[in-house]
Image: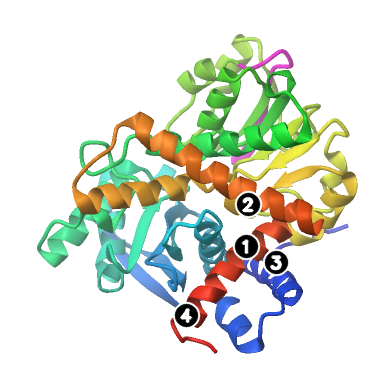
């Protein structure tokens, strides 16, 4: 039997359509919000180290900017597609609205594999992407940030190119910059910490002590590493993580039933999040197939990699012990798996709240860059904790009051806020 394939953009639209029907959005407003306001497809010529020129295809999609400038990351990935970027831009709109920050949704991508590019080739790609899009982005228009396989170094190259083109200093053009060059303290930890701030509140509502729980992560990038670190410091036990092995072109799962030493794992992990499996084995860890992340005997699952990872085809592999799923990644659960999760009685924390710590801290960075005044790390994290806790409480209260699935309740809050903005602007009546 061939496993069903999923289009993330169709998933995003299906999720929107479901809630639009629940809250009775009129047809014109629905048509406006279920697709991007504008999108750009560009070709980026890059001079390669061997003297040749290679042309890469890139995208920037601005889903909606009624509540503020479009905001969203730029990812480098060999399997990037326009529909993935469209979906991610749409989810960013709801994410910014859910945590009530004055930004809209955008997303960017380039079809490439950074593993196979030298540093100078990556710099050329970053600068070329900005050259193609500099007229349609800016601090008050569209603000990029890091995403999959992009970093603070990439953001600074992009900022430098943007400032060269426009002849000035515009540090608020991009976020995720290095600290000392307009970046915010706490930004590196923000997405992962945010996952745990919200999980902490959920466990209180469920009457579960965090220090008595176990967790399994899919992924070992920035989100999983910092989420795992904070979770461990609060007394929880990380049983497993998974990662991608670019050499073997497959993922694998690292497990230690009595708890992984995340600091040790971080020390044997390369810049792309790949753990050295031989060193992990030597440290007493098990190495399992990559898809084993979903079947671990843990209390909490946190998918923190890519979209479409939990589907009807694999949901029965989730252990009956799992009580909570926290979506650290964007769109990791397909719409046809949601009802099955609900039937299982698993408490789900949806992506555009669970991983909103990154965009919230990006907003803080943007505010600091535009004002040229920077906050101490504790202040950043305290503000982040407060913002996300308030957003979670509003979501949980609505879900309980209306007896709604958490994802549906999150969409109701976010979509209503965006609908209000487009109506107040007079875009629809």
| Residue at the left extreme, as displayed | 167
Q: Which residue is located at x 45 percent, y 29 percent? A: 270
Nearer the camera: disc 2 or disc 3: 2
Instruction: Find the distance from the CA under tag 2 to the CA under tag 1.
Output: 9 Å
At 21% across and 51% down in the image, what residue appears?
371
- Which residue is rendered at x = 41% and y = 74% of the image? 41
Is 256 in the magenta? yes
Sequence-first tag of 1 and 3: 3
Q: Which of marks 4 and 1 is nearer the N terminus?
A: 1
Dot 2: element: helix
Q: Name the residue under label 2.
A: 394
Kindly state the secondary structure of the residue where label 3 is placed. helix
Q: Mark 1 points at which residue?
A: 413
Say whether disc 2 or disc 4 marks the residue closer to the N-terminus. 2
Q: How many marks?
A: 4
Question: Which residues lie in the magenta part?
Answer: 249-260
**10 Å neighbourhood of mark 4: few (<14), some, or many (≥20)?**
few
Cα distance, mark 2 to mark 3? 20 Å
**According to the image, label 3 marks what residue?**
15
**Residue 287 can be seen, yes or no:** yes
Q: Name the residue under label 4.
A: 424
- Label 3–label 4 contact, CB within 8 A: no
- At label 1, counting other C-alpha atoms closer than 10 Å, the crowd grade (few under 14, some 14-19, many 20 or more) is some
Horizontal and vertical percent position of residue 96: 49, 58
């Amino acid at each position: 039997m061939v496993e069903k394939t999923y289009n993330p953009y169709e998933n995003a639209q299906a999720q929107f359509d479901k809630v639009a029907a629940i809250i009775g959005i009129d047809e014109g407003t629905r048509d406006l919000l279920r697709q991007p306001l504008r999108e750009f497809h560009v070709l980026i010529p890059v001079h390669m180290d061997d003297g040749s020129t290679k042309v890469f295809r890139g995208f920037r999609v601005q889903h909606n900017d009624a509540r503020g400038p479009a905001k969203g990351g730029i990812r480098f990935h060999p399997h990037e597609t326009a529909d993935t970027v469209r979906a991610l831009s749409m989810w960013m709109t709801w994410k910014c609205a859910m945590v009530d920050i004055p930004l809209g949704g955008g997303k960017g991508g380039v079809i490439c594999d950074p593993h196979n590019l030298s540093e100078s080739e990556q710099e050329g790609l970053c600068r070329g992407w900005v050259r193609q899009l500099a007229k349609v982005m800016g601090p008050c228009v569209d603000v990029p940030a890091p995403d999959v396989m992009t970093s603070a170094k990439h953001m600074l190259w992009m900022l430098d190119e943007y400032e060269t083109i426009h002849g000035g200093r515009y540090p608020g053009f991009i976020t995720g910059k290095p600290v000392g060059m307009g970046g915010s303290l706490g930004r590196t930890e923000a997405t992962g910490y945010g996952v745990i701030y919200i999980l902490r509140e959920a466990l209180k509502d469920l009457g579960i002590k965090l220090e008595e729980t176990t967790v399994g992560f899919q992924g070992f990038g920035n989100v999983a590493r910092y989420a795992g670190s904070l979770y461990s410091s609060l007394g929880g036990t990380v049983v497993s993580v998974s990662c991608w092995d670019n050499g073997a072109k497959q993922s694998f799962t690292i497990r230690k039933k009595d708890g992984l030493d995340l600091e040790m794992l971080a020390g044997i992990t390369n810049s792309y999040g790949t753990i050295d499996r031989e060193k992990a084995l030597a440290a007493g860890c098990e190495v399992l197939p990559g898809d084993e992340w979903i079947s671990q005997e843990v209390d909490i699952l946190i998918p923190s990699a890519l979209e479409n990872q939990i589907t009807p085809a694999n949901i029965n592999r989730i252990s009956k012990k799992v009580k909570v799923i926290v979506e650290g990644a964007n769109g990791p659960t397909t719409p046809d798996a949601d009802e099955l999760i609900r039937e299982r009685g698993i408490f789900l924390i949806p992506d555009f709240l669970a991983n909103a710590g990154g965009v919230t801290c990006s907003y803080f960075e943007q505010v600091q860059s535009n004002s040229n005044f920077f906050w101490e790390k504790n202040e950043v994290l305290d503000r982040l904790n407060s913002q996300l806790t308030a957003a979670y409480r509003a979501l949980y209260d609505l879900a309980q009051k209306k007896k709604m699935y958490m994802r549906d309740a999150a969409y109701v809050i976010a979509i209503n806020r965006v609908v209000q903005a487009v109506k107040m602007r007079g875009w629809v009546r």
